[in-house]
C-alpha cells in the first residue's frame, strides 16, 4: 500500500509539473499583458518600462526558470491587476467552487443511480424508454442555455430564486440544477448499461438459483459489480466540476474558481491562471487517487495486484 | 408421497425472438425417482439446458414461456407457482450447478458471503451458525483450509476449487433435487474425475435425486441410472443405462455411442453424425432426425413418429414400428 501511495505521489508531481509547463508557454502565446494595462496610445518608453518592471522583457527560458523556482516554494507571484498574492486569490475562491461541485455531484448521484438501476430492471418498458429519451435530451442541451432558461423562468418570471451571485442556499439552487442536468444524464445512461451488462452475467443466475429475491439480486449482487465503471465516470465529472464549471459559473456570476480563471485569462493575468492550473492539477490527481482506492474497495481483483 | 420426485409431462417452451416465436422444447416428458440419477444427453442446442432451467424456474421471464405441459415436483405443479413461492424451492428443495465455474461466482463477494445467501433465504440461523454450516459443507466437498477460504474471493481459487464451491452452494440446504448442467465440461480431465467421484459420494450420503445434464456419454456411463436422450428439443430415447449402451434403439443414440473415441483405435477417422441439429425454426413435419438418419425411409419424412415402448425402454423412431419391423424381416 505504501509503495502504491509513493508511486502515485510521484505521478502527481509529474502531472502538476507538466501542466504548469504547458500552460506557462501556451498563455504567453496569447500576447504580452502589458498592452492590456496601458492605453493603446501609450508611448514606447512607458511600455518598455512596464515590461522591465514585470520582467516580461527577459528571455522566455529565464522567465520560465524563475517562475518554476518560485512555484516550487509556493510562490506564484502577484496578480498583475490587483497586486494580491495569486495563489491565495485562487484558494479564496475554492470553497464556493467546492460547494457548487459537491452539491451538483451529490444531487446527480442520488437521482441518477436509482434511475439507471430502475431503467435497467424495467428495460424496454415505457419507463425505460422515457428515461433514456430524457437523458439524451439532457446531454444534448448546452449548459449555458439551460442555465439561462432556468434564470428566465425561476428568477425573472416567477421571482422565486436569485439569478446570480453566491452566499445563500437559494443562490445555489439554479447553478446546481444546471450542472446536475448533464451529470445526471451521463450517470443514468452509464448506470443503465453497466447494470444491464451485469444482470446478464452467469453469477447473477447463480444467486437466483440460490433463492435470492430480485430486489437483492439488483441492490446487492449486481449493483456492486456495476459500480466499477460508474466510479470512473463520477471521478471524471467531479474533476471537471471542481476545475471550475467555467460557463455555468459565468452565467450565474458564481464567485468560484471557474469565473476567476475566465476573467484572469481575459485580462492575461498570468500568475492567477498558473496558480489556478496548479490547484486544479492537484485536485485532479487527488480525485484519481481516491477513485483508485475505491476501485480496490469494490473490486477485489485489483486489490491483489 | 409417491416415489417420483420430479415428473415432466408434455413440456413445451416457447421463446420470442426478433423473428417471431420459436419452440425449442416440444412435448418433453420424463420422470425422476427419489434417489435416482437421471442423465440427459444430447448435442448442443438439443434443449437440455432449457429444460433444466425450466425446472428451476430460471427461464428468462420476458422472452420465454411454458406453453404446454406440466412439471410436478413433490406432487405439486411448479409451473403454476408464483415467483415468491418458487423462490422458496430454489436453493432449498432444488439446486443447480452450472457449467462455468469461472463465471458463475460473483467476483466482488467473498466465498463466505456468497454461500450465506441460501441460508439467509431459507434457514433461520444466527451468523455464527451460518458460518459453521458453511465451513462444514466446504469441508464436505473436500476444500482444504475452509476457514480461510470463506474470506477469499472467487478469483483466488482454481477452476476445480470454484466448482467445489458451486457444489457446496447447491448443497447447503440439503436439496432433494440437484440439477447438474455439465458440471465438469470446463474442467481438466483429472479434476473432472475428482468432481464426479465427489458428487457420487455426496449423492449416496444425502439420498438426493440427480438430474445430470451432459453431452459426454462417458460421464453418463459413470454417473447415471437411467438416461434420456434429447434431440432438437424432443426426447428421442429413454432407457436404463446398461440397456442404452448395449441396445440403443434410436439411430441418433446409436450415432452418439458410435462417435465416442475408443482405446487404441487410430486406424480410422472418428465416426461422426453428419449434419447439424436443426434450429427450432427449421423444424417441419416428419421426424426431426430424418435428414441426418442413415436408416430414414419415406414415412420418416412425412409423419412424426410416436413414442414406441419396449418395456421401460422408450424410443421415438419409426424403426420400432411393428409394421416396419415386419417389412425388414
Image (tube, rainbow, N blue to C red):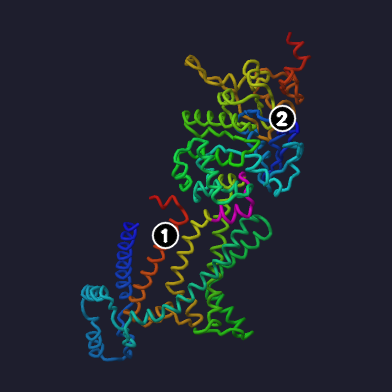
B156 or A281: nearer the eye? B156
Classify B263 as above or below A2.
Answer: above
Q: Position of residue B147 (x, y in %)?
A: 46, 44
Magenta range is A209-223
Few, some or many residues within 10 Å of mark 2 (<14, 14–19, 20+): some
Look at the numbered disc 2 and give the secondary structure of its residue: strand
B169 with respect to A69 (left or right): right
Is residue B283 placed above or below B57 in the rendered structure? Answer: above
Q: Residue at x 23, y 82 (%)?
A: A55
Quadrant in which residue A149 is drawn: bottom right
Q: Position of residue B52 (x, y in %)?
A: 65, 36
Q: Which residue is mark 2?
A: B30
Same chain for the residues under marks 2 and 1 in the image = no
- Chain bearing tag 2 is B
* Residue A184 rendering spot, x and y as whole percentages: 55, 66
Q: Is residue A55 above or below residue B63?
A: below
Q: Secondary structure at mark 1?
A: helix
Residue B302 tag number: none
Judge whether residue B139 is colored magenta.
no
- Please count the marks in the image: 2
Would you place residue A206 above or below residue A69 in this image? above
The residue positioned farthest toward the top in the image shown:
B329
Say which quadrant the N terminus of chain A sits in.
bottom left
Q: What residue is rendered at 68% in x and 22% in y?
A: B239
Q: Residue A151 lies in what quarter of the image?
A: bottom right
Crowd rating for badge 1 (residues with CA inside 10 Å; few <14, some 14–19, many 20+): some
Specify the principal SS of the magenta part: helix
Amino acid at each position: 500500500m505504501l509503495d502504491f501511495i509513493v508511486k502515485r505521489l510521484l505521478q502527481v508531481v509529474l502531472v502538476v509539473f507538466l501542466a504548469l509547463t504547458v500552460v506557462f508557454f501556451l498563455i504567453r502565446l496569447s500576447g504580452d499583458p502589458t498592452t492590456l494595462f496601458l492605453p493603446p496610445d501609450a508611448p514606447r518608453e512607458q511600455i518598455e518600462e512596464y515590461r522591465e518592471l514585470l520582467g516580461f522583457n527577459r528571455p522566455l527560458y529565464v522567465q520560465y526558470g524563475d517562475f518554476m523556482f518560485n512555484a516550487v516554494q509556493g510562490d506564484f507571484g502577484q496578480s498583475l491587476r490587483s497586486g494580491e498574492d495569486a495563489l491565495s486569490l485562487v484558494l479564496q475562491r475554492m470553497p464556493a467552487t467546492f460547494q457548487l461541485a459537491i452539491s451538483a455531484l451529490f444531487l446527480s448521484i442520488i437521482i441518477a443511480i436509482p434511475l439507471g438501476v430502475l431503467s435497467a430492471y424495467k428495460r424496454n418498458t415505457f419507463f425505460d424508454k422515457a428515461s433514456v429519451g430524457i437523458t439524451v435530451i439532457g446531454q444534448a442541451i448546452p449548459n449555458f442555455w439551460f442555465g439561462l432558461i432556468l434564470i428566465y423562468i425561476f428568477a425573472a418570471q416567477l421571482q422565486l430564486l436569485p439569478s446570480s451571485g453566491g452566499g445563500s442556499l437559494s443562490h445555489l439552487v439554479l447553478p446546481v440544477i444546471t450542472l446536475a442536468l448533464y451529470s445526471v444524464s451521463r450517470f443514468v445512461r452509464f448506470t443503465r448499461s453497466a447494470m444491464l451488462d451485469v444482470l446478464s452475467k452467469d453469477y447473477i443466475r447463480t444467486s437466483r438459483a440460490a433463492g435470492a429475491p430480485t430486489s437483492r439480486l439488483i441492490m446487492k449482487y449486481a449493483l456492486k459489480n456495476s459500480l466499477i465503471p460508474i466510479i470512473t465516470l463520477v471521478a471524471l465529472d467531479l474533476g471537471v466540476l471542481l476545475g471550475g464549471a467555467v460557463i455555468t459559473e459565468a452565467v450565474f456570476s458564481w464567485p468560484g474558481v471557474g469565473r476567476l480563471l475566465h476573467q484572469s485569462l481575459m485580462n492575461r493575468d498570468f500568475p492567477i491562471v498558473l496558480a489556478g492550473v496548479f490547484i486544479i492539477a492537484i485536485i485532479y490527481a487527488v480525485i484519481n487517487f481516491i477513485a483508485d482506492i475505491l476501485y480496490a474497495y469494490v473490486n477485489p481483483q485489483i486489490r491483489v495486484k | 408421497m409417491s416415489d417420483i420426485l420430479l415428473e415432466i409431462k408434455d413440456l413445451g417452451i416457447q421463446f420470442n425472438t426478433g423473428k417471431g416465436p420459436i419452440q425449442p422444447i416440444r412435448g418433453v416428458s420424463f420422470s425422476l425417482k427419489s434417489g435416482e440419477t437421471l442423465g440427459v444427453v444430447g448435442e448442443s442446442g438439443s434443449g437440455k439446458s432449457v429444460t433444466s432451467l425450466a425446472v428451476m424456474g430460471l427461464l428468462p421471464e420476458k422472452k420465454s414461456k411454458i406453453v404446454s405441459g406440466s412439471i410436478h415436483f413433490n406432487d405439486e405443479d411448479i409451473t403454476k407457482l408464483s415467483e415468491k413461492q418458487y423462490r422458496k424451492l430454489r436453493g432449498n428443495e432444488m439446486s443447480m450447478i452450472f457449467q462455468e465455474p469461472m463465471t458463475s461466482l460473483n467476483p466482488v463477494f467473498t466465498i463466505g458471503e456468497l454461500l450465506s445467501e441460501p441460508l439467509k433465504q431459507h434457514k433461520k440461523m444466527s451468523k455464527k451458525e451460518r458460518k459453521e454450516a458453511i465451513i462444514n459443507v466446504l469441508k464436505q466437498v473436500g476444500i482444504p483450509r475452509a476457514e480461510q477460504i470463506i474470506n477469499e474471493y472467487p478469483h483466488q481459487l482454481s477452476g476445480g476449487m470454484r466448482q467445489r464451491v458451486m457444489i457446496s452452494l447447491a448443497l447447503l440446504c440439503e436439496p432433494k433435487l440437484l440439477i447438474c448442467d455439465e458440471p465438469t465440461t470446463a474442467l481438466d480431465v483429472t479434476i473432472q474425475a475428482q468432481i464426479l467421484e465427489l458428487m457420487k459420494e455426496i449423492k449416496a450420503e444425502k439420498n438426493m435425486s440427480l438430474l445430470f445434464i451432459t453431452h459426454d456419454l462417458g460421464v453418463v456411463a459413470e454417473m447415471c441410472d437411467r438416461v434420456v436422450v434429447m434431440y432438437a428439443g424432443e426426447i428421442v430415447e429413454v432407457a436404463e443405462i446398461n440397456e442404452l449402451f448395449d441396445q440403443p434403439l434410436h439411430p441418433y443414440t446409436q450415432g452418439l455411442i458410435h462417435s465416442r473415441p475408443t482405446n487404441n483405435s487410430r486406424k480410422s477417422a472418428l465416426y461422426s453424425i453428419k449434419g447439424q441439429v436443426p434450429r427450432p425454426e427449421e423444424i417441419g413435419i416428419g421426424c426431426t432426425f430424418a435428414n441426418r438418419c442413415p436408416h430414414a425411409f419415406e414415412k420418416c419424412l412425412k409423419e412424426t413418429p410416436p413414442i414406441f415402448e419396449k418395456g421401460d425402454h422408450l424410443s421415438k423412431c419409426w424403426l420400432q414400428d411393428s409394421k416396419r419391423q415386419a417389412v425388414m424381416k
